[in-house]
Amino acid sequence: MGKTEIAVALAEELGAEIVSADSMQVYRGLPIVTNQPSAEQLARVPHHLVGTVDPRDEFSVSRYAGLAAEAIDDTLRRGRRVIVAGGSGLYLRAALGGLTFGGPPSAARRPGLEALAATDPGALRERLLRADPAAYAAIDADNPRRVLRALEAHEAGTAPPRDELWSTAGLSREVRLWCLDVDREGLRERVERRVDEMASRGLLSEVAAAPRPLSRTVAQAIGVREMLAVLAGELPLDQALARMKARTRGYVRRQLTWMRKLNADIIPTSARPPESVAREIAARLS
C-alpha cells in the first residue's frame, strides 16, 4: 500500500485536494519514471504540481515553494482542504512555508560540482564538511543534491535551505503532520516490485521519447540516468534496473531517517487497506 493511494482515499474522506511535494513528479511526459499518480487516481481527486513542468526546464525548491503556495491558497479560497503528500522533507517544508532561499545556482560553479557529485560523492561531502561543518550537520549528507546545493551556497556566500522539519514551529500555516509506519522488509519488496512494474509498463520507451535536452534536474531522477545509460549502450537493462532499485532503497532509507525525527502523528499501515488508514486519519482530525 502506497502513500499516494492513502492520500487519495483521505482526500475523498475530507473533500480535499492534493498538492504533490515531489520534486520529480512535476515533470510532464514522464509519469512512469517519476511514479506519478495513475490516471484513475488523478480522476478521483484533483492534484496540483503533477505533470506540469517541461522536462527540458530546470526546477528548484524555491520555484516549487511559490507554485505550491499558489496552489494551496487557491484551494483554500475555494473552501477545500489541502493534503500535501509525498516527496522529500525539504519540499514538504517549502510547501508549508518557513524556508528562506539564497540566490540562484551559479552557472559557473554548478557543472563542476555536478561532475564531482556523479563521480565521487564522498569527495563532495568531504569538501562541504571542511568548508562548512554547520551546513553539513544540518542537511541529509547522504543526498548528493543536498550536499551540492549546500556547498554551492557556501561558495556563493548565501545560506542554503535546511533539510530539517522536526516540528511545525515557525511554519506559516497551521498543519497536522502524519507519518506512515511501514514494515521495512515489506517496503523493500515493494521497491523491487515497483521497479519491475515500471520496466514492464514502458519505462525505457518513456525516457527515450522524452524531449531533449533534458534538464540537469530531470537527468538526476532515479531511473532517468539509468535508462539514458541503456539508450547510450553503456549499460545492460538488467543492470540499470538493479541500480534503480539500489538508489530507490537508499532514498527510502533517507526518508525513513527523516520521518523518525519528525514531530508527527504516526499511523500504522501494515496489512491495512488505504481506506482504513484514511478513515483513521480523518477521525483523528475531527
Image (cartoon, grey):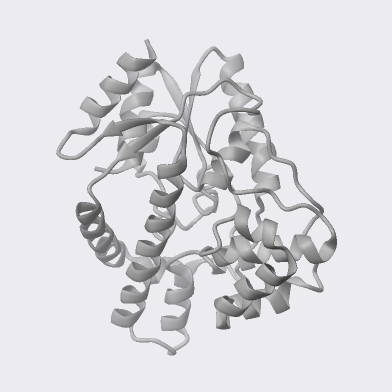
Residue 176 left/right relative to 95: left
The N terminus sits in image quarter:
top left
Position of 241 relative to 260 (above/below): below
Q: Is residue 58 visible?
A: no
Residue 185 left/right relative to 51: left
Tell which of 21 and 70 is nearer to you: 21
Q: Position of residue 155 (x, y in %)?
A: 81, 66
Q: Residue at x 74, y 69 (%)?
A: 131
Position of 214 relative to 119 (above/below): above
Q: Residue at x 55, y 69 (%)?
A: 219
Q: How many marks?
A: 0
Q: Is residue 278 visible?
A: yes
Tell which of 154 and 117 is nearer to you: 154
Tell which of 257 and 237 is nearer to you: 257
Residue 148 left/right relative to 199: right
Position of 155 relative to 278 (above/below): below
Q: Residue at x 35, y 44 (%)?
A: 38
Q: Residue farthest to the right?
A: 157
Where, by quadrant of the figure, is residue 76 drawn?
A: top right
Q: Residue farthest to the left?
A: 271
Q: Position of residue 196 (x, y in %)?
A: 25, 65
Q: Position of residue 236 (x, y in %)?
A: 34, 86
Q: Position of residue 9 (x, y in %)?
A: 31, 28
Residue 269 left/right relative to 100: left
The C terminus sits in image quarter:
top left
Where, by quadrant of the figure, is residue 181 drawn?
A: top left
Position of 115 relative to 133 (above/below): below
Tell which of 161 and 216 is nearer to you: 161
Q: Residue at x 85, y 59 (%)?
A: 157
